[in-house]
Image (cartoon, grey):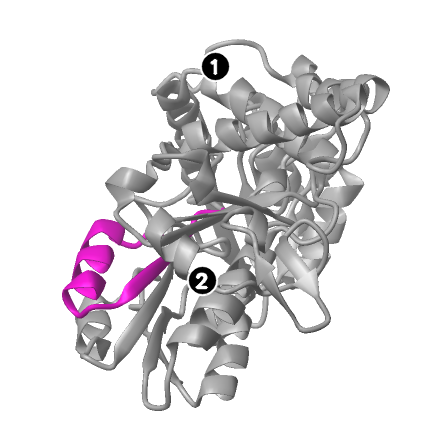
Amino acid sequence: MTDSRPPAPMRNEFPLLARNPGLIYLDNAATTQKPACVLDAEREFYETANANVHRASHRLAVAATGAFESARATVAHFLNATTPNEVVFTRGTTEAINLVARSWGQASLRPGDEIVLTELEHHANIVPWQFVAQATCATIRAARIARDGTLDMEHFHSLLSPRTRLVGCTLASNAIGTMPPIAEIVAAAHAHGARVLVDAAQAVAHQPVDVQALGADFCVFSGHKVYGPTGIGALWAREDILQAMPPWQGGGEMIDRVSFAGSTFAPAPARFEAGTPPIAQAVGLAAALEWLIQQDRAALLAHENALRIRLENGLKHMPGVQIVGPNTDKAPLTALRFAHAHPFDVAQFLDNHDIAVRVGQHCAQPLLQALGESSLLRVSFAAYNTEDEIDRFLAALEETLELLA
């Protein structure tokens, strides 16, 4: 059996988990817990350098600006961007996609243009494109999934044409874990002259995301899914594209000159960061990424995948339980349906055992409709989860299903 023990004890590095020794937290695809270094970094900022950024010359303002721009450089390093100027801080993946849709999309799309998405997408990579398609008279086309939850690549390729202007695709489905062949998708889209936006929200905590190797034009992620704070995330875009995009919000910081006759705007990334940014959250995000960079990431991913396999092997012996989605080559999460119980009831009974899982449509209604499901129960893993937790989950699930039968 594969040894899935993490390379070093981790649970005690996470204060919430340390204070709740009986808690089995398996809702990591929704949000991860935070290591102490992240909490310490935010508190230290407020205690030693709290001021606004880019606006004043006093000592605290200089320190705050330095911390904020250092955080941008950390994100750039984490993604292997060519320059920190390719990184825009946002409130998360959702805002980052809205930024691209409202700025690049409304400036670039014309009637008859097409946006190709997939049935795997989170609502955040669907609804903003619906807004911009309606505003520009563009059309959205969706690549189907196959019966096993993988992307139907034959159908995807059939949707591409000279009218395709943008392809939006997740690196890993938040609902069922499918990881589409992103290199093939990017190459095919570029061959048709289309831009590519990659939603990396479910990937960055588990695998290195190298934007230069990825080859896409836009990449987005959220801090709270990668051991960082809520309210912070990032958009990476190729510098030439970013510099050509118009502002999407107006206010302080994003301007060059303002008069009542008109305004001119700062270069990117400042052009896209109107108002006071999430400074302490950016510092916390940098601490989370630095913490993750220091880990043996290959070992962590092997650990998380081994936990998933341990879970799925245990589920094989439970009648009426079916895994939804691919069986291999997927993110470290497992989606379940039950023949004789509703997922909400199962989740409630598990919560009574102090086991936290996610149940519902997972902000992926088109995906669940394609699967013929109304809701699924999702178990998702992080570096701090253990084999013992998986065994306890399996025992609690078996007991729950017997009660609900």
* Residue placed most toward the observer, 28 or 57: 57
Give the camera-side residue of 404 and 198: 198
Alpha-carbon span between mark 1 and mark 2:
35 Å
* Residue for badge 2: 245
**Res. 317 visible in picture:** no
What is the secondary structure assignment of the residue under circle 2?
Answer: loop
Secondary structure type for disc 1: loop
Question: In which quadrant of the rendered view does residue 399 lie?
Answer: top right
Label located before the other in sequence (1 or 2)? 2
Taking the spot 69% from the left edge, 60% from the top edge, the residue there is 344
Q: Which residue is mark 1?
A: 294
Q: Which residues are magenta?
A: 178-201
Is residue 361 left or right of 372 when viewed as pictured?
right
Going by the numbered disc 1, the residue's amino acid type is: Gln
Q: Position of residue 237 (x, y in %)?
A: 40, 50
Q: Nearer the viewer, residue 270 or 46?
A: 270
The residue sitting at 26% across, 68% down in the picture is 194
The residue lying toward the viewer, choosing from 109 and 262, is 262
Task: From this view, report whether residue 66 is shown above or below residue 162.
Answer: above
Image spot of residue 397 (x, y percent): 62, 43
Three-letter residue code for mark 2:
Met
Position of residue 275 relative to residue 375, above or below, is above
Q: Measured from the top left, where is residue 67 in percent x and y?
A: 65, 24
- Asked whether residue 349 is in view, the answer is yes
Per the rendering, the mark at residue 193 is none
Which mark lies nearer to you, 1 or 2? 2
* Outermost residue to the top: 8
